[in-house]
Every structure is written in structure tokens, then in C-alpha cells.
Amino acid sequence: MDYSHQTSLVPCGQDKYISKNELLLHLKTYNLYYEGQNLQLRHREEEDEFIVEGLLNISWGLRRPIRLQMQDDNERIRPPPSSSSWHSGCNLGAQGTILKPLTMPNIQISEVDAPPESEQTPSPTDSRGLKPLQEDTPQLMRTRSDVGVRRRGNVRTPSDQRRIRRHRFSINGHFYNHKTSVFTPAYGSVTNVRINSTMTTPQVLKLLLNKFKIENSAEEFALYVVHTSGEKQKLKNTDYPLVARILQGPCEQVSKVFLMEKDQVEEVTYDVAQYIKFEMPVLKSFIQKLQEEEDREVKKLMRKYTVLRLMIRQRLEEMAETPATI
């Protein structure tokens, strides 16, 4: 890739921009990290607009079940009749009309009078005393009857199963079925979507839900950048998730993009995240230290303003004792 130096700006949020040169440096680091993998990103310019595109990893962080769209498997395994299969045209006319079943002709079989013994000559094909076949005896060709066409019920071939799942991606191996259409994806499991740097957070959410045929509204969810330190930063509707991922760096051991419910997760700032993983006794000692520091600052301010108050009163007394001059 050509990471030539550029000077124009690239939007990364509402009223937020980054120089193309700086973004290209981050992109180069990102692609070096994923060298030889399909997570590498590509960039191009279209109508003077700098666009980055590729796969974005998103981790499932849902606490409540999701609903998959209703879809009957039977609707996906009924292909139109094909002339390549011998049974596809059974009972169908030229225009697709149903024909009446054919009736077998009534053939009467009568015994043939045996010729005199003197006229019977052994035949090469009649070595065991069997009667030779008559050449003019009518024969019925063996055909496949309608009885052989049986419905297979719920038994599906691998090709049928692939056809059913062709337009429905699995969520960590889970496909839709009537019993488990409502379920919760494993927390922390990873999926990905192909997006570009011009797609905002709501657009990425809708794309992800549509990929897995999720019935829930995109308004119920949000994307969060979660750091190992515990910091949680919610991506705004005006943010661009792919640009945010590039700026955060490629290593997912440091930070990940999570799909979470809006009403179940609160943002955690960096200052607060520093104390999240401490034990309760340690946190209590921190609170005690902060309380002592606050008390010292309060006393310091009280002494300062007490001195100022005394100085103002002293000056007022001096002005009152001095006679006014005309």
C-alpha cells in the first residue's frame, strides 16, 4: 500500500477531524499487526474523499436475549421443478397442470397349446427344459412408477441444508430454529462485519443486525470501546466505528469493540477505571485519604478567607476614623 504523506483532514466524529497523514500512520501500524490475515484494511480515494474499508471485529456483550427473525425452513427447500430430475415432472403436464394418474392396461394372459412332442426340438437356450420365448409375444418395458416417488419427510441432504443456511449467518454456530429463536449470544464471543470509514454507528448496528437476521431494533443497542483497564467509552451516533478502531490500535488485548444494550451499560471514564479492580479495603483507604486531603484543603481556604476578612474590617475602621477632607 502507498502510505504517501497527505495533508487533508478526515472526519472521525462530529466536529472532530484527523489529518490524513496521521491516519495513514495508524493504518500502517494496524495492517502490520494483522499482516497475512483477512483483518487488514484497504484505503482508496473516491471523489476526493479518503475511504478505509475492511472487516471490523465486534464482540457480543448482551445481557438479555435477542430474537431472530421468523423463517420457516420449509419455504427454503422447495425449489421449482427442474427438468434434470426424473421425478420433478411427475403428474405435471406441459403447462404445469396436474394430470390424472395413468391406468395400467388390462392384459389377459391365456395358456398356449403345447405342440406335439415330435415337433419339440431342444433349444440352446432351453437346456433345462424351459419353453423358448415367442418372438411375437408382447413385452412391457419396465418403467419407474409413481409408487417409487416417496416424500422424504424431514430428512434433508447436505445440499438442502446448505440451501437453507445460504442467506443466514450463524452466531457462533447457532442457526435459527423454532426452539431457540430467542437466545443470548455467549458473552465475549467475536463476530465481524465488512464496513468502511464513512459508515456511522447506527449504520454499522443495522448492518450487523441484518447480517444475523436479528429482529430487535437497532435503537436498543450501542457500540462501546471497552479497555482492559475497565474504561468503557460509548460511540456516539456521529462517530465512525472503523476510524475509532484504527485510532485505538489493532491489539484487542488492550481494547475491544462491544455490542451492548443502551440501558444496561454506563460509561466508565479513565479516572474511575483506575480504581475499579482494587479490593474493597484498598478502595476504602483511598476514600479515607481523599477525605483527609479534602479536610486539609477546606481548613486552608477557611484560614485564607479569615485573614482577608480581618484585613477588610481593619481598612474600614481606618477609613471611619480619618476625618473627611473638603
Image (tube, grey):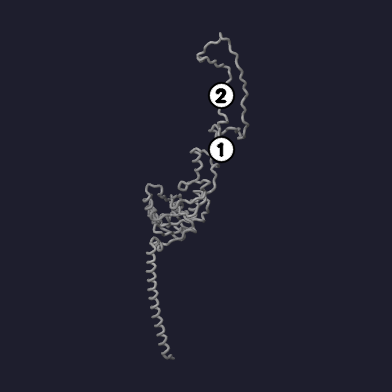
Q: Visible in this render: residue 48?
A: no
Secondary structure of residue under mark 2: loop
Q: For the C terminus, which image quadrant?
A: bottom left
In the rendered image of this protein, does residue 133 appear above or below residue 202?
above
Mark 2–mark 1 Cα distance, whole angstroms, equals 30 Å
What residue is pinned by disc 2? 141
Q: Nearer the viewer, residue 275 or 83?
A: 275
**Depicted 191 relative to depicted 155: above or below:** below
Say whether residue 192 is left or right of residue 86: left
Q: Secondary structure at mark 1?
A: loop
Q: Residues within 10 Å of mark 2 (few under 14, many from 20)?
A: few
Choose the circle earlier in sequence order: 2 or 1: 1
Front one among 144 and 320: 144
Question: Residue 136 is drawn in which quadrant?
Answer: top right
Where is residue 315? Give x, y as percent: 40, 85
Specify few, some or many for label 1: CA neighbours under 10 Å numbering under 14, 14-19, or 20 or more. few
Can I make out residue 305 in this image? yes
Three-letter amino acid code of the residue under disc 1:
Pro
Instruction: State the mark number for residue 80.
Output: 1
Amino acid, disc 2: Met
The count of marks equals 2
Residue 119 picture location, percent across and down? 56, 9
Q: Position of residue 46 (x, y in %)?
A: 45, 51
Query: x%, y% of residue 2?
Result: 38, 50
Front-most of residues 249 and 297: 297
Q: Residue at x 37, y 51 (%)?
A: 33
Residue toward you, 160 or 223? 160
Residue at 58%, 18% (x, y): give it: 137
Q: Is residue 301 left or right of residue 214?
A: left
Q: Quadrant of residue 296?
A: bottom left
